[in-house]
Image (tube, grey):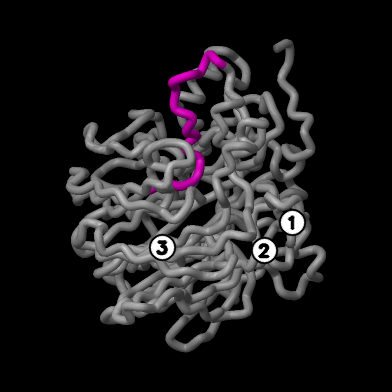
Amino acid sequence: MTGVRFTDPMFQGRFAPVRTEMNVVDCEVEGTIPADLAGSFYRVGPDWQYPPRLPNIPFDGEGHAGMFRIENGHVDYKSRFIRTQRYKAQAAARESLFGTYRNPYTDDPRVKGLSRGTANTALVYHHGKLMALKEDSPPVVLDPDSLETLDDYYTFGGKLTSLTYTAHPKLDHETGEMIGFGYEARGEASRDVAVVFVDKNGRLTRELYIQAPYAGMIHDFAVTRKHIAFLVVPMATDVPAMKQGRVHFSWNSSLPTWLGVMRRDGDGSDLRWFKGPERCATHTMGCFSDGDRVYIDMDMGLKNQFPFFPNSDGSPFDAIGAQGRVTRLSVDLAQASRPGYDMEVLYPNSGVLSRQDDRYHTHPYSVGFMLCFDPTRPVDQRLAAPMPPMNCWTRFDHATKRTQSYFAAPQSALQECCFVPRSAGAAEGDGYLIGVAQQPLENRSDLLILDAQRLADGPLATVRLPIRTFGQIHGWWVPAYAR
């Protein structure tokens, strides 16, 4: 390779790689940082190390982690590439060595046997470790202060046998337990799903296996005090397409969704699958059990929500059908012969990346948040392919069925929001909403801090970065008192 250039239109504009590790001390702040806000906001996303060797999708870039550390009204920002096995191999070769998204058939032979994981999707802090996650591989452990990579293939002391681990484990804030899973756990296109339980000290206490109805994407799941639930959507693993050089998944509209529910304290033998229509849902807002009835709230669309994953029948991406709305799935386990599950759309708002107050991961909840489309924009602007920018954060209060929103400037591109409790014992939803806004006209980024109960009032503080930072998929807040 004589030079490095990103010529593919997919990696231009707001998807252009940053490729810059940053260290900004005492960021510029407009407004006032709340006196009771202290901790670290970690974020991660894909950032290309080298131009892809084959046509690829934005989500397959190398993991880049960032940290806004907030203390005494000051904010420092730091970012580092995650030194995965993949990153290190490419750094040594000074070129891209891995092929298309989750497709080992397209890799350079020199990387055979190395982990393909990019650690670019989510972060979680548990048992004193900051873990970067990508659902096709085990976690990668980072130093929570320096962001340096400490372990590029973390298996909980060698106890994890699954080859994969979710980007969305759930923390039980009463017991400290972390519950996770891995799909395609025994290899490419396997129907095996590993369910993994880790205690508050990081000891893997149980790893049990169940079978999914077919090999397909299970990006997120639900854990209540009594139950665990998995939604399998028709984003099916497509091995024939992979052998032809295409990406791991294709959308098969002839397949149903399946909602699997099992007891949390069981061995998986009681697992029941409930059939539903074609739907796409990737993120759980919240969930709870009421006796034998289980409720799961997800941002759900009618069709494939990923424009870069093809429809297997060759049909074009349906931007209208892809719109995600907060949808409540429920099933009564006491009805022994019930074949399907119930669905109810709770709000008209359309968006992605639903979140909640993370202290309520496994408990009954009433407040959620989501990155949404501005409903005042024309539909063709809101749904322009491949991935339209969004400029609205919305709070959903289920008890009152009311919403409130913050609208950024039309030219801003908000990323996923994260809720921060005002204190360890604060009421649900009492705190701050934080997240990054990309400012494409200025080619830089801001961190916004809002009162989560008064979103319409706008930011309490805006933390200005001098240049653009990488695009985030998910973020995680760690309060100072938890360190």
Write the start and end of the magenta stretch as one range.
Answer: 109-124
Residue 269 x %, y %: 25, 59
Disc 2 is placed on an element classified as loop
**Residues marked 1 and 2 touching at CB (< 8 Å):** yes
In this rendering, position of residue 467 left or right of residue 220: right
Task: Quote the CA–CA distance across marks 1 and 2.
Answer: 8 Å
- Which residue type does callout 2 highlight? Ala
Q: For residue 273, what is the image quadrant?
A: bottom left
- Which residue type does callout 3 highlight? Val
* Mark earlier in primary sequence (2, 3): 2
- Which residue type does callout 1 highlight? Phe
* Crowd class of label 2 (few under 14; some 14 to 19; many from 20; radius 10 Å): many
Q: For residue 479, what is the image quadrant?
A: bottom left
Query: Of 283 and 310, which appears nearest the observer?
Result: 310
Disc 3 is placed on an element classified as strand
- Residue 317 - label: 1
**Total label count?**
3
Residue furthest bottom as drawn: 400
Q: For residue 73, what is the image quadrant?
A: bottom left
- Residue 322 - label: 2
Residue picked out by circle 3: 420
In this rendering, position of residue 412 left or right of residue 405: right
